[in-house]
Structures are given as structure tokens and as C-alpha cells.
């Protein structure tokens, strides 16, 4: 399960999607997220599926590598679907027991929320898989730069998000090592009920938190020792520049957003 999380990881393939400016990918991901909530029926979600499938093909990232990240959200997906199915009121009642009711509207809402959650995870993972942490930091900082006028610490926010994404695979690897060490000492993380499994996680969480705080402290000391300070006067090794590919990408994104708005207006 730990190795199945793909969010925050980078997969180099040299595709067209990798060569796009990170600002383009940020805006594209935002437009895709908005479109997922604009679509309400099967034709709309079919358009979103075609668009997402095309981006996966263009990225040259293996489909299995992208979809294995869904295993990590299986429990969240299951609980979300169950709550929507059992607690959503509606006119067409299919099953009822005490305060629990299964309606046609609840099934439709559960399916819609499940599709949205899956698409959000895949779309976000696709952005991080095709963008390095440094590019994510530079792109987010350039997009939020106008907020500097109202004294918003844009660089600090961008740096924190970049470090958080960068630490995801590191912490996952550390978790895997600690889990294997605990299993070798006789720990069992699979047997028992939910409460017992939660108790079994204590020997895993304590050393993980200690390791995370130690890594954060080492990183802070290293940045301070190198006299690191962000801000407007910080230079970049590779300044961000839009290319012809980015212009084409913006045209495609504008057309896709127009289709999503049109489908929303038509109720599709």
C-alpha cells in the first residue's frame, strides 16, 4: 500500500507534457479540476475521460504506474460512496432499514463523487509525475507573484509546498523501511479488527515522526548554513519562458473549458 502512492513522485520520460512550462501545467490541472465539477452526466464525464486519457498517452508515463496510486485512496473512496448511498435522501427509495435508506439519487451521487475523486487524484498525480519539485516551486511562485503587492509571502508558500511534495516519496520510503524492520521483529500490521490495527501502527508512527522531524531539522540547518533566503532578488538557473507548445496547450485548454461550460449550460 505504501509503495502505491504516486503523488509527489517524478517520472522522467521526455514527453511533450514534460517540456511544458510548469505554469501551463498548473493552470491546466486547475481547469481540469473545475471541469470535473462542471460535468454532471455521462456525456460530460466521457469528455473528461477522453481528455485525461489523451494527457496520459502524451505524458508517456505507464498507465499501471498512474493507476496504482488509486489503491491508496481505496478506503476513502469506499467510505465516501457508502455515506452518499446510505445517507442521501431521494424520491425513488430502493431499500430502507431504520434510518438507512438507499435511493436512486444516492447511487447517482455516489457514482459521481467516486468519479470526481478518482479523476482529481489522477490529474494531480499526472502534474507531479511530469514536473520536478524545482519546476513546481518556480511555476507556483511566478503564478502567485501578484500577491506580493498585498504582502503575501509567495516564495515561502511555494517553497513549503515544494518541500512537502518532495518529502512524500522520502517519507514513504522511510515508512517502508520501518515497517519491514518491525515485521522482522515480529510485528503484525494485518491481523485484528480496526482498533487492533490502529494499536499495531503505534510502533510504526513513533519512529516515523521522529525521523520526519529529524529530516526537517537537518534541512533547516543546511539551508541556514548556506545563507539561503528567498525573495524577489533570488536568481534561477533555468528561467521560465513560454514556448510555442505552451501557446498550443493554452488554446486546447481554453477549448476544453469552453466545452465544459457549454455542457454545464446544457445540463450534460
Image (tube, rainbow, N blue to C red):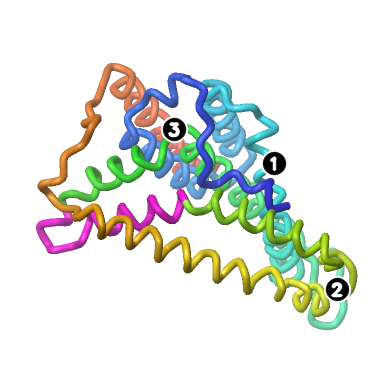
Q: Quadrant of residue 152?
A: bottom left
Q: Which residues are magenta?
A: 147-166
Q: Main secondary structure of the magenta part?
A: helix
Q: Which type of secondary structure does the marked residue at label 3 adopt?
A: helix
Q: Which type of secondary structure does the marked residue at label 2 adopt?
A: strand
Indicate which disc, 1 or 2, sits on the residue closer to the N terminus.
Answer: 1
Residue 243 rendering spot, x and y as whole percentages: 26, 20
Q: Is residue 97 left or right of residue 33?
A: right
* Badge number at residue 159: none
Q: Quadrant of residue 43?
A: top right
Q: Quadrant of residue 180?
A: bottom right
In this view, the residue in front, 119 or 237, is 237
Residue placed at 47% from the left, 20% from the top?
15
Residue placed at 32% from the left, 30% from the top?
21
Q: Which residue is mark 1?
A: 68
Q: Which residue is mark 3?
A: 259
Amino acid at each position: 500500500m505504501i509503495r502505491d502512492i504516486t503523488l509527489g513522485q517524478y517520472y522522467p520520460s521526455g514527453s511533450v507534457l514534460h517540456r511544458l512550462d510548469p505554469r501551463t501545467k498548473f493552470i491546466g490541472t486547475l481547469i481540469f479540476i473545475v471541469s470535473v465539477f462542471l460535468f454532471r452526466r455521462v456525456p460530460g464525464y466521457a469528455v473528461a475521460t477522453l481528455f485525461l486519457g489523451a494527457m496520459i498517452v502524451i505524458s508517456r508515463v505507464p498507465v499501471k504506474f498512474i493507476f496504482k496510486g488509486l489503491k491508496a485512496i481505496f478506503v476513502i473512496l469506499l467510505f465516501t460512496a457508502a455515506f452518499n448511498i446510505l445517507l442521501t435522501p431521494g424520491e425513488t427509495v430502493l431499500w430502507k432499514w431504520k434510518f438507512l435508506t438507499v435511493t436512486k439519487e444516492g447511487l447517482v451521487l455516489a457514482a459521481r463523487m467516486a468519479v470526481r475523486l478518482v479523476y482529481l487524484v489522477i490529474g494531480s498525480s499526472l502534474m507531479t509525475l511530469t514536473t520536478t519539485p524545482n519546476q513546481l516551486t518556480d511555476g507556483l511562485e511566478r503564478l502567485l507573484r501578484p500577491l506580493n503587492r498585498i504582502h503575501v509571502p509567495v516564495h515561502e508558500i511555494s517553497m513549503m509546498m515544494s518541500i512537502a511534495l518532495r518529502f512524500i516519496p522520502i517519507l514513504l520510503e522511510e515508512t517502508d523501511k520501518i515497517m519491514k524492520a518491525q515485521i522482522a521483529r515480529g510485528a503484525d500490521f494485518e491481523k485484528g479488527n480496526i482498533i487492533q490495527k490502529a494499536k499495531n501502527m503505534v510502533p510504526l508512527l513513533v519512529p516515523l515522526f521522529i525521523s520526519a522531524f529529524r529530516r526537517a531539522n537537518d534541512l533547516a540547518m543546511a539551508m541556514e548554513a548556506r545563507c539561503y533566503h528567498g525573495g524577489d532578488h533570488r536568481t534561477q538557473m533555468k528561467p521560465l519562458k513560454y514556448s510555442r507548445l505552451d501557446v498550443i496547450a493554452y488554446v486546447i485548454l481554453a477549448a476544453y473549458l469552453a466545452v465544459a461550460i457549454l455542457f454545464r449550460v446544457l445540463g450534460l
